[in-house]
């Protein structure tokens, strides 16, 4: 099931007569407690098993596919469970993957909203899924303090560069234009900055002999698809005390 939250519309004219309040829209539940409580992110040591993951995407969803495979028969098996997909792009190719996996999706369009309003709308939609962790997998928006505050230390992102050298979008094109012999894929926690959160794991990408930016990206994605599930599983094991073969051999910070 897809829940679409379109851009806000101008308010209708004020009614001329006093009316009873309309019932709440069940498709967009309004939290009664804190955002974190309503989203259901559990503190370490008291989380459900497996840990419930909400995955955020903006595009084709190749990292989502890797996470789904790792959940079925890989390092996330019995450790993490994807319970829903969030996107800011109604035409994102990853939504087809979500539909094929029978996962609910939440589409929150950013037009007409501030970053904070956008993330409040996401939190209202997330409440039904009781997510423990948010996993950004090719999500192109910079999340606001609203989302970071609701899930402190519980949002992960994968960035196709070493943040000390390059932050933001188009990192593989940057690596190509800089003629780097090697670049880095980074998994990190999300804070209020752009790719500035604590690093959890990194892995190198050999670019020697690459013939163009598309090949640079293909090589990088192979590393991303291997590193992200392992780093996520290791984070869950460490933070929530989950068992399982979740060893991540990449360097950690």
Image (cartoon, rainbow, N blue to C red):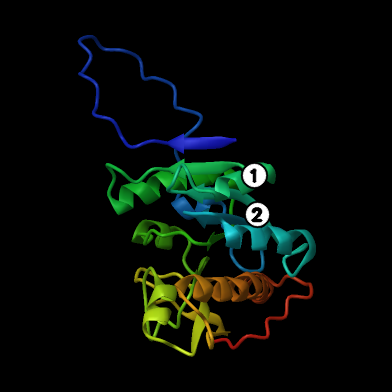
Position of residue 10 in the picture relative to residue 204 (left or right) = left
At 51% from the left and 52% from the top, the residue drawn is: 37
Residue behind mark 1:
103
Along the line of sight, the residue nearer the viewer: 248 or 133: 248
- The crowding category of the residue bearing disc 1, from other C-alpha atoms within 10 Å (few below 14, some 14 to 19, many at least 20), is some
Q: Which is more N-terminal, label 1 or label 2?
A: 2
Instruction: Locate residue 217, reporting x and y percent.
Output: 51, 72
At 47% from the left and 43% from the top, the residue drawn is: 91
Q: Do residues under tags 2 and 1 come within 8 Å of each other at their CB atoms?
A: yes
Task: Measure how far apart labels 2 and 1 are at the Cα level.
Answer: 8 Å
Instruction: Locate residue 241, reporting x and y percent.
Output: 70, 72
At 56% from the left and 71% from the top, the residue drawn is: 218
Q: Quadrant for residue 240, please give it.
A: bottom right
Residue 116's place in the image compared with 5, above or below, is: below
Along the line of sight, the residue nearer the viewer: 162 or 145: 162
Residue behind mark 2:
82
At 45% from the left and 48% from the top, the residue drawn is: 123
Q: Quadrant for residue 63, please give it.
A: bottom right
């Amino acid at each position: 099931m897809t829940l679409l939250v379109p851009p806000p519309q101008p308010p209708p004219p004020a009614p001329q007569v006093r009316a009873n309040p309309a019932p709440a829209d069940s498709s967009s539940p309004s939290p009664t407690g804190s955002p974190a409580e309503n989203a259901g992110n559990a503190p370490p040591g008291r989380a459900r098993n497996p840990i419930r993951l909400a995955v955020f995407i903006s595009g084709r969803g190749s990292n989502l596919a890797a996470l789904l495979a790792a959940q079925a028969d890989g390092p996330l098996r019995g450790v993490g469970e994807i319970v829903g997909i969030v996107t800011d792009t109604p035409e994102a190719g990853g939504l087809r993957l979500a539909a094929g996996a029978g996962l609910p999706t939440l589409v929150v369009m950013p037009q007409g909203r501030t970053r904070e309003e956008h993330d409040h709308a996401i939190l209202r939609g997330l409440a039904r899924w009781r997510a423990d962790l948010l996993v950004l997998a090719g999500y192109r928006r910079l999340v606001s303090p609203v989302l970071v505050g609701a899930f402190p230390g519980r949002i992960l992102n994968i960035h196709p560069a070493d943040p000390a050298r390059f932050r933001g979008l188009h990192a593989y094109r940057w690596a190509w234009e800089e003629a780097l012999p090697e670049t880095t894929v980074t998994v990190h926690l999300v804070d209020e900055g752009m790719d500035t959160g604590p690093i959890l794991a990194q892995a190198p990408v050999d670019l020697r002999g690459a013939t163009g930016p598309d090949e640079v990206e293909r090589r990088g994605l192979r590393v991303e698809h291997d590193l992200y599930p392992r780093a996520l599983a290791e984070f869950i094991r460490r933070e929530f005390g989950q068992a399982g073969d979740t060893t991540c051999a990449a360097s950690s910070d």
